[in-house]
Image: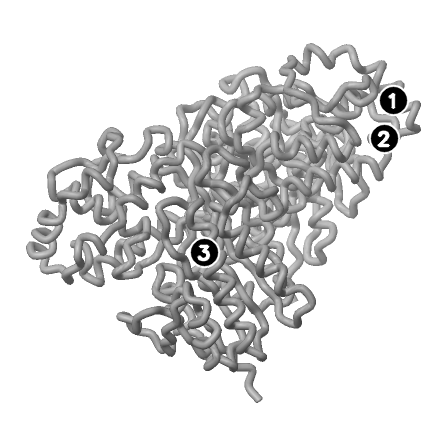
Amino acid sequence: MAEKRVALVIGATGIVGGNMIRHLDSREDWQVIGLSRRQPYYESDATFISVDLSDPEECRSKLGELAHITHVFFAGYTDRPTWAEQDAPNLALLANPMDVIEPLSQNLQHVCLLQGTKAYGSQLGPFKSPAKESDPRHMPPNFYFSQQDYLIRASEGKSWSWSCVRPHAVCGYAVGIPMNLVSCIAVYATISKELGLPLRFPGSPITYSALYMATEAGLLSRAMEWAATTPACADQAFNVINGDYVRFENMWPKFAEFFDMETGPLQRIDLPLMMADKAPLWDEIVKKHDLVPNAYEDMAHWPFAQYIFNNEWDMMSDMTKCRTFGFLDFIDTEQMFLDQFAELRANRVIP
Amino acid sequence: MTDRKVALVFGASGIIGRGFLRHLDGLNDWDIIGVMRNPPNFDTRAEHLAVDLTNRDECLAGLNNVPHVTHAFYTAYKDFPTWEAAAEPNTEMFKNTMDGLLANAPNLEHIQILQGAKYYGRHLGPYKTPSREDDPRHMPPSLYFGQEDYLREIQSGQPWSWSAVRPQAVCGLSIGNPLNLTSVLAVYAVISRELGLPLRWPGKPEAFHTIYQVTDYEILGKSMVWAATTPDCANEAFNITNGDVFRWDYMWEHVAGYFGMEVGPPQQINLAMMMADKEPLWNEIVEKFDLAPTPFDKAANWSFGDYAFASDWDVCMDTTKSRKAGFLDFIDTKDMFLQQFDELRDAKIIP
């Protein structure tokens, strides 16, 4: 019988960390400890420690007993206005807890780091796509590089290994996490419908027809467990996407159909600006349709949607490396959106 | 009794038919009959059956010695000046063949037709990509529509089933069949190198950067057997590709690297026109490097190169449907090209 693995999931209330914990809960051979500032929004058998990871003192005092961790899954993130400003604080989120746990946990086997397509400069402008893990880095700074380099250095001569996973636009179950494309689209559609508008793509016409991709949160969880426990994956980075590519222009009519709306002609709007005054309308919709009361600002982070709908270049990562190493899971992305809209509806989050 | 299967392959001397015979040669639960006008000039354990498929009477009479056939694979194609002009005669040829087959093959379990990305109008101009099997058809004519419609019609109420596979730009070593991107790339590179030129992109400048996709003949062969023998695939069409997509600007560096060349700036040329006078040079190369003599017109099909390198729109298909149905094979397209260059080198076709 295999020894029980002990996972430390850092960033337990994010969309990735939360889904990872729920995934590991469903597996028999894992004991799970979650770190986050907030209390989890989901039921779980995991132990949660509330800690401010940016504070090394607090990490020392609250994590000083964690001597039995075998696997670390890092999905923490702290937002800053620029990439240069993001670098040091995000490195600290990883280094502070690692500096405490790593010397204590003698059985540490693996640290799996969450990255993303921004490792390829997807946010900077047109980049080489489909991106492969072997592509050269872009000009720093990029906190993904700093975090990965930290793990490379820290694991040198040690018995544990590391891996990186690079999903794109993670979509899945989450509450109060507005950086979520599914709920952004669902809220945008619901509000448009309430106002008697057709479902118009609110971004750039070029983005509407560019290639895009996404990663379903459950698939990402399976990939992270796989990367963390497969010996061949030691010290490797992996793109993890659903495995297909989509264009918003192809999906948009299907979305409109789901919400029982017409597809409208394109109309580019500044979402943060135009959606700023819609909180009262959202509250009315919640009341009218007897929905679970969710605060407007917890439902959609409009700068995030604005960003996604205005990247005027193809967003593509190549999945060949993952497949070659043995991870063959895939998800139909268009169907994923429709399924997750349906889930929001079933949970009475949207009408 | 055994469940031996008997394949009848129409068009067995074409690039796809020949590649498929090679694939079936390795499967010991299959007996093979190849329909082609002349006996095969390559090694195969396939029985040879000469039938002129354009001649209806010959089809009806000539297929009477195949009563034991269980699976028919239709890969035959008769060339015409335009794809549109090919539609009607190729549909007629298919009808002749099917009528002859069905009158003579009581053990028939499955008929498979070979289609391609042209089903989606890939050749006409920008079109909806990634293409899915249920996308609406383009304006007819297309031989694919004519053949598929006839197949659907005659299958109705019958105990046998049909399937269609849709690859894109099938690549594979098929000596004497130059309709193949691997051969075009290799011979173009070798000639450029001999002339002291860098490896220049000869296609449309925009096509250097658009999304493209190919299908390895071994993947195709596996998928054909899979679709023909998997009950869930009955009466369905499947896109079949390597599973990744690429841009030529990326691939070009690897092609140049293989041949020890520099990547030159793009220079659009009409290959069919510019390569027309290179036969003496090719013969010199063959002599100089002691190659197996391949006639120049059998070494590479330049018109096919011109066609493949001219898509200034994305060309790609979605393979989610075949993955869902259980076909998970894939190959890294870059590795495929390099392996096939190796095969050309080992066969002493190129230096």
- Measured as percent of width and height from the top left, residue A169 is found at 61, 33
Quarter of the C terminus of chain B within the rendering: bottom left
Give the residue number, with chain letter if any, for mark 3.
Answer: B90
> Label 2 is found on which chain of the structure?
A
> Label 1 is found on which chain of the structure?
A
In the rendered view, tell whether residue A329 sits above or below residue A98: below
- Crowdedness near tag 3: few (<14), some (14–19) or many (≥20) residues, C-alpha within 10 Å: many
Give the residue number, with chain letter if any, for mark 1.
Answer: A285
Q: What residue type is labelled 2?
A: Pro
- Measured as percent of width and height from the top left, residue B59 is found at 45, 71
Mark 3 and mark 1: Cα distance apart in space: 59 Å
Q: What element carries label 1?
A: helix
Q: Nearer the viewer, mark 3 or mark 2?
A: 3
Q: Pointer 1 and pointer 2: residues touching (CB < 8 Å)?
A: yes
Q: For residue A351, which numbered disc appears in the image?
A: 2
Q: Which residue is drawn at 63% across and 25% down?
A: A55
Q: Do labels 3 and 2 share a chain?
A: no
In the rendered view, tell whether residue A324 sits above or below residue A144: below
